[in-house]
Every structure is written in C-alpha cells, then in structure tokens.
Amino acid sequence: MAIGIIHGMMTRDILSGLVGKEQLKRFVKETEDVDFRLAHGHGAGHRVGKFQIEFEKYGGKICLDPGAEYQAVRFIREGNLAWAVHFILDGACPEHIFPFREDIFRLFLSEPHMNFSLYLFLRYKRWSDQVKNASVTQVNSLEDLKEKIVETADWVYQLPCSYLREDDVKIIDPRIGKKLAFRNWEMSDDDIGKILERTSSLIKGAYNFVSK
C-alpha cells in the first residue's frame, strides 16, 4: 500500500461497484498521484499519528504533520475523497504501523518497507476478491471515521509480524517463528488479506458517508 500502484489497484476494486467508469478512472489516478504530489513528511503524515511517534522513537525520519487519520478527514472536508482514500490505505498498512526499517539505498533488496509493498503488488490477485466483496463499515461522522482509522491501525498492530526495525533490531514474533525471511519481514497471507478487507470495508463506509 505504500507505492502508488497498490493504492490504485485497491481503489479500483473497492469502488468498482459504487461509482461510474469515468469517475473510477479519476479516483484511481488521484490516489496513485498522492505520493508524487504530497511527499511523506512534506505536507502530510502518512502514518497514524501514534505510529509516527513510534517510528521516530527508533530513529525514523521526523514528520511534524498531522497523522493519516487527520489527513483523511482533512481531504474529505476539502472535497477530495480520492486523496482521503489514499490516507486511509496508508494509515492501515503494516509498513506504516510496525516501525519497519527504511533505507532503500543501504539495504537495497532487503529493505522491509519496500519489500512489503513489492510483495503486495506481486501477489495482490490472491486478495482482490476480499477487497471487492468487503462489507461496509458504517461511518457516522468525520470524527467517527478518524477514530475508526486509529482503531484499524491498533488492530493491525496486534497481528503477528516479525520485521527488521528502523534501528536495525530484528523483532521476532514468537507466533510466527524464530527467523526473518531474506526480505526482512514476515506476516501471514491470511492476515494480510484480513487487513486489506478491513481497510476496504472502512473506505466503502467513508464513501457512503460522503455520498449521503
């Protein structure tokens, strides 16, 4: 979910039955464009606020902007639901919740943050039906949406995940095993599917709320 094309693929599946063909094309393009037009730490926080603080605690790049839960609400208020969708997706993705190591130049193919995104891209088809068929989470207000984004991130944080942390410490979840794969993260495909499904459900709820 941290690279633009994943945002577009998920947006297409989430909203395909809710919006017209041309509007969907525009939504997909706009959700993919956010990372190019609003870089991380330069106008928007792409992590839920509490997990940005957690990332910084281990030496991660400091971001002074409000977290993803605030950005989603901000862009709905500004009439840009596509950008709001991007931040809901960002706020719920594991590489923005667990403090995965981020250093593509030093770690290259073993950087866990980018490797998670690549894995998601290459294997997305196995979860696409879960995304398309996700139920709708009821959203009653923008404050309710903000709270549900945080609740979703908290729920993801409780799932089994092993990873190379930002400070180079290997975090091994005993529910998974004793070793990290070469990609420097480990999470089950079942749990990844559950994350994508729950996030999709929340986005459908946000869309229904905005469309009232």
Image (cartoon, rainbow, N blue to C red):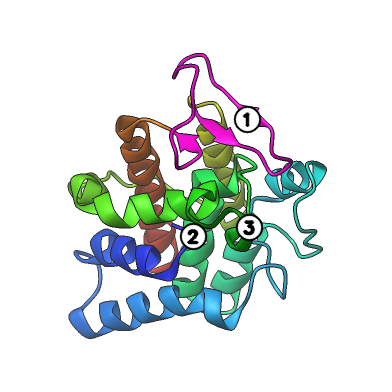
How many badges with numbers are in the image?
A: 3
Residue at 39% in and 53% down: 205
User: Residue 178 magenta-drawn?
Assistant: yes
Task: Specify start and end residues of the magenta stretch as a single range.
Answer: 161-186
- Label 2 crowd (10 A; few <14 / some 14-19 / many >=20): many
The numbered disc on residue 106 is: 3
Q: How far apart are marks 2 and 1 (CA)?
A: 21 Å
On screen, residue 76 above or below 197: below
Which residue occupies the foreground of this view, 160 or 85?
A: 160
Side of 179 where 129 appears, left or right = left
Report helix, strand or loop for mark 3.
helix
Report helix, strand or loop for mark 2.
loop
Query: Can residue 62 be seen in the rendering of this structure?
Result: yes
Q: Which circle's residue, 2 or 3, is located before the other in the chain?
A: 2
Which residue occupies the foreground of this view, 94 or 12?
A: 94
Side of 59 where 180 appears, left or right = left
Q: The residue under label 1 is which amino acid type?
A: Lys
Q: Nearer the viewer, mark 2 or mark 3?
A: 3
Which residue is under mark 1?
Answer: 170
x, y percentage for residue 59?
80, 48
On screen, residue 181 above or below 7: above
On screen, residue 174 above or below 22: above
Q: Which circle's residue, 2 or 1, is located before the other in the chain?
A: 2
Quarter holding the N terminus? bottom left
Q: The residue under label 3 is which amino acid type?
A: Arg
Q: The residue under label 2 is which amino acid type?
A: Ala
User: Residue 55 magenta-drawn?
Assistant: no
Which residue is under mark 2?
Answer: 2
Q: Distance between the residues labelled 3 and 1?
A: 17 Å
Side of 196 where 85 appears, left or right = right
x, y percentage for residue 86?
48, 65
